[in-house]
Image (cartoon, grey):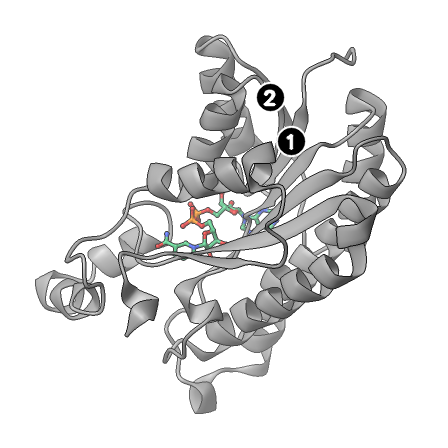
Amino acid sequence: MSQTNKPTILITGGGGGIGSVAAGAFAARGYRVAVCDIRLDAAQLTVDAVRGAGGQADAYGADIGDAAQVAALFERIAADYGRLDAAFNNAGIGGGGIPLADISEEDWERNLRINLSGTWRCMKHEIRMMLNQEGGGAIVNNCSILGINGGANASYTATKHGIAGLTKSAAVSYAAKGIRVNAVCPGLIEAGLGLNVIRRGEDALRKFLSLHPIGRAGTAMEVVNAVLWLCSDEASFIHGHMMPVDGGYSSH
Ligand SMILES: NC(=O)c1ccc[n+]([C@@H]2O[C@H](COP(=O)([O-])OP(=O)(O)OC[C@H]3O[C@@H](n4cnc5c(N)ncnc54)[C@H](O)[C@@H]3O)[C@@H](O)[C@H]2O)c1
């Protein structure tokens, strides 16, 4: 693959809901998009859609929960792209809505391995690349309202609070080095993991939506609009911000 003068972005979890919408939106803004997913076929579908719309994107298969696969991913990105201007650490799994005392060792380890260690691992490689290039870069983590508030979904809530810590810690360490690190904290979104809540039926949905003062779920594009802004020069003084995209949920 040849290198171009376009700004580049890595989107993890780009084969699914919010990540695939982000890939299309960043490509439409002129980015070359590295779409990573544990499901290479899904990443390739996103890439096909981006290319069909005239954008530039490439598919990469990697499990962010596996150190060797992530190291290999970044070696390929360095070779293919030469630089990384932005990253959207979006890959993640739901915790299954399980309260703390009922979580098995296996589920707990899996959630930590993917959501928290996977996000840290990607950030580590992204920051190293950005430190070694002119102009720094911008990183946005996909956190959650459950990274700000409590929720019965204990392992998910714990990993998302951990992502908040990684976001703020990296912002403190790397702001002076030209790397901006922020997070979006979506409420219920009509895409990906959010569809599991929506599919639970009218009663569960009504209860969940009652927590969102706006009275509806958000769209993937409403999350992506915040990510686009946080990656842009318009957000040049924004560091370590946990931006709610939640229809007012976290204002309670
Ligand atoms: N949809 C919502 O309501 C909502 C709300 C708050 C936060 N979020 C966050 O948004 C992010 C995206 O979720 P989504 O709702 O679009 O769901 P999704 O399941 O459609 O997207 C997640 C993507 O990550 C990929 N993935 C899972 N494990 C991976 C791994 N180990 N390595 C690489 N890729 C992996 C999946 O294959 C999938 O394509 C998640 O971090 C989620 O916690 C979603």
Percent across and percent down for residue 209 are 18, 63
Q: Which mark is residue 9?
A: 1
Which residue is most to the left? 202
In x, y percent, where is residue 164?
Answer: 58, 66
Residue marked by disc 2: 31
- 109, above or below 227, in the image: below
The reply to whether callout 1 and callout 2 are in contact (CB within 8 Å) is yes
Residue 182: numbered disc: none
Task: Please indicate whether residue 174 sits to the left or right of residue 104 in the image.
Answer: right
Mark 1 element type: strand
* Amino acid on which disc 2 is placed: Tyr
Nearer-N-terminus badge (1/2): 1
Q: Please tell me whether mark 2 sits on a helix, a strand or a loop.
A: loop
Q: Residue at x 73, y 52 (%)?
A: 123
Pick the front one: 196 or 248 = 248
In this picture, residue 176 sits left or right of residue 199: right
Q: Residue furthest right?
A: 132
Q: Residue at x 55, y 25 (%)?
A: 44
Residue under the image location 40 percent in, 79 percent down = 150
- Badge 2: few (under 14), some or many (20 or more) residues near its Cα, within 10 Å? many
Ligand 1 within 8 Å of disc 1? The answer is: no
Taking the image as shown, residue 67 lies to the left or right of residue 167, namely right
Q: Quadrant of residue 149?
A: bottom left
Q: Quadrant of the C terminus?
A: bottom left
**How far apart are the alpha carbons under marks 1 and 2?**
7 Å
Q: How many marks?
A: 2
Locate the N terminus by quadrant: top right
Q: Is residue 81 visible?
A: yes
**Place of residue 146 in the rendered image (x, y in percent of width and height, measured from the top left):** 43, 70
The residue under the point 41% across, 37% down is 225
Mark 1 is on which residue type? Ile
